[in-house]
Amino acid sequence: KGDIIALALRDFKFANEVFGVKTCDRLLKEVAGFLKGLAPTGRVYRFDGDVFCIAEPHGAENTDRLVNLIVDRFKKPWHFQGIDYSLNCSLGVVPMGKGGTETVDEIVSAIDFAIQESKHRENGVVRGGEIFNEKFRRKNHIRAMLAYALEKDGFEVHYQPIYCLATGRFATCEALVRMRDPEFGLIPPDEFIPMAEENGMIVSIGLVVFEKVCQFMTAHPYTEGGFETIGVNLSVVQCMQESLADDLIAVMEHYKLPPGRFKFEITETVAAASMSTLRSTMERLIDYGCAFALDDFGIGYSGVTNMLNLPFKLIKLDKSLTDRLTGEPRTRIAVEAIISLIHRLSMRVIAEGVEVAEEVEILRELGCDYIQGYYFSRPLPEAAFTALVKKTAWR
């Protein structure tokens, strides 16, 4: 019984790169010594590289006291060899013996969850309670349901139409997977994809999704003519598989679909994690006739490098750029320059996350090629998407 206080140092990988491993190891010892002083009876543990845990058996009041002491200490720099180092931390408080934290595996899972949750909190602290327990239960439930969904056809694909500014009509779309759960209904991909990547199931899920997209394209002849492509997302784990290109080509050949109808979308994270394998996969699929899009451009540090080094045909501007178009002149100047650069490199631009008419008009003025976002449509189930296509005279 009692609580576990989990402390994770933020951006410690960056600190290692700047200050060196030796210095950062000493900083870790300084932090461990401070925590040891808070819990002198030896209840301090190193949970993972930059994560420490304190087992506190004496109740919520003492837990709160320790959390406040840790927060106050991290407001001050850490002094070592004549230099002050600023360290930030995230704190998660996990109640033991409550809400699915009774076994060792449950406690370890809860600590991981608490640390991740705390990184999204403004004050960097998350405490166990009803909200925490509900979120933790939901995550564990979804993790357990992945195999069931794969076996029982629990994945479905929604389609978000993408508007072409030059022709004034929808010309392409993005396929987005959802998991249908008996208890929670439709689960969005940002909840279950990371779990599926962790346990390796994303490879099988990715092929199931792609086959569903191919079945959809085969069933709807209106994808002929003016409809250019369907975008399909590839995850980092999929792109690490040397067999990926052959697997995707086998599905396309089974359904006798022309490869020019597909654009595969990858993020900067994917490109950074699996560059060598990814390049050979891209070249194989491009030689076959498919195209590639770089997704979420503008949120990472390596976007331009990836854009130059890998054979993309489309670049998708992240919502974080389009969101600021109407209120920040500097953003408009930057986006205009980015679009111009992309065009000069013989690629086209899709702006993501567009929600208001003013953003559409600005992007039109800046020469953007395609618009994707709630202004035109949310992702739709197959039937609703088909109805929208027919209603808007797709021809």
Image (cartoon, rainbow, N blue to C red):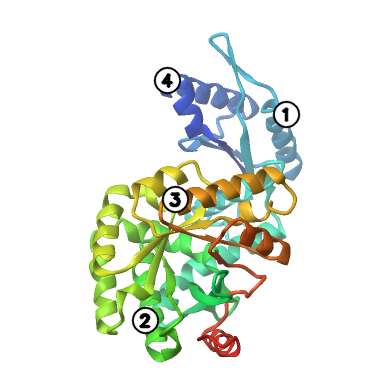
- Badge number at residue 103: none
Q: Earlier in the sequence, mark 4 or mark 1?
A: 4
Q: How dense is the environment of label 4, judged by Cα within 10 Å: few (below 14), some, or many (20 and up)?
A: few
Q: Earlier in the sequence, mark 2 or mark 3?
A: 2
The residue under label 2 is: 214
Please state which of the two labelled residues, at mark 1 or mark 3, is closer to the viewer: 3
Q: Earlier in the sequence, mark 4 or mark 3?
A: 4
Q: In the image, what residue type sits under mark 4?
A: Lys
| Above or below 265: residue 5 | above
Q: Does residue 3 appear in the picture of this structure? A: no
At horizontal 40% and vertical 91% (from top left) the residue drawn is 219
Q: In the image, what residue type sits under mark 1?
A: Asp
Q: Residue 329, position in %: x, y?
A: 71, 45
- Badge number at residue 22: 4
At horizontal 33% and vertical 73% (from top left) the residue drawn is 260
- Badge number at residue 344: 3
Q: In the image, what residue type sits under mark 2?
A: Cys
Q: Is residue 27 left or right of residue 246?
A: right
Q: Marks 1 and 3: CB-CB under 8 Å?
A: no
Q: Residue 37, position in %: x, y?
A: 62, 24
Quadrant in which residue 132 is drawn: bottom right
Please state which of the two labelled residues, at mark 2 or mark 3, is closer to the viewer: 3
In the foreground, 348 or 1:
348
At horizontal 45% and vertical 27% (from top left) the residue drawn is 17
Q: Residue 120, position in %: x, y?
A: 64, 48
Residue at mark 4 to residue at mark 1: CA–CA distance: 26 Å
Q: Earlier in the sequence, mark 2 or mark 4?
A: 4
